[in-house]
Image (cartoon, rainbow, N blue to C red):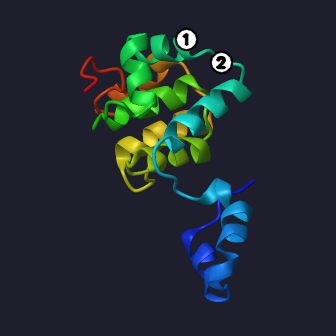
Amino acid sequence: MQEKKTADLDALLETMRPDQAAEFFEENREDMADEGKAFYYYMKNAFDAKSLKLKDIYSFAGVSESWGEKILRMEKHTKNRDLIIRFCIAGHFSLRETNRALKLYGMTPLYSRNKRDVCIILAINNRIFDLSQVDDLLTGQGFVQLSIDDIS
């Protein structure tokens, strides 16, 4: 299912009455930004659907289970966009799934006009989910790798 564009949601709202809000929320729940735990539920559901264990995701992303859990649950907030991308790569996310995760976390999605992001997009689109291969692609183009030790 393709994520609806904001303009499409706006167009739907133009013809709706206030008493139709609950119906709108129900019909468009997957496209709505949600307070609180939306990021966690999105990530957890995606990992579960792919039969991936959280401890494996944390290990692959290079974080401890306790830190990874705090980031996923948004008990602690990171400004490190690469960490969220590493979670997504560990989860074998598509580009659409990765961008949705980044948006839910409050970060900018991968952008095809940004050269470093292009390398990451190419890796994701070609199903390269080995972090060392993604890092090789990035460093081969002169960019900082994803697996930097700084996780804050």
Q: Residues within 10 Å of mark 1 (few under 14, many from 20)?
A: few
Q: Residues within 10 Å of mark 2 (few under 14, many from 20)?
A: some
Query: Could you say which disc has been placed on residue 56 in the image?
Result: 1
Going by the picture, which residue comes out furthest to the bottom?
15
Q: Which mark is residue 89?
A: none
Q: Do we see residue 94 in this rendering?
A: yes
Q: Quadrant of residue 124?
A: top right
Residue ID at (48%, 27%): 87
Q: Secondary structure at mark 2?
A: loop
Extreme front residue here? Answer: 19
89 left or right, relative to 2: left
The residue labelled by disc 2 is: 52
Residue drawn where x is 32% and y is 30% of the image? 76
Marks 1 and 2 close (CB-CB < 8 Å): yes
Is 96 situated above or below 14? above
Quadrant where the C terminus sits is top left
Looking at the picture, how far across and down is residue 100, in whole percent? 54, 48
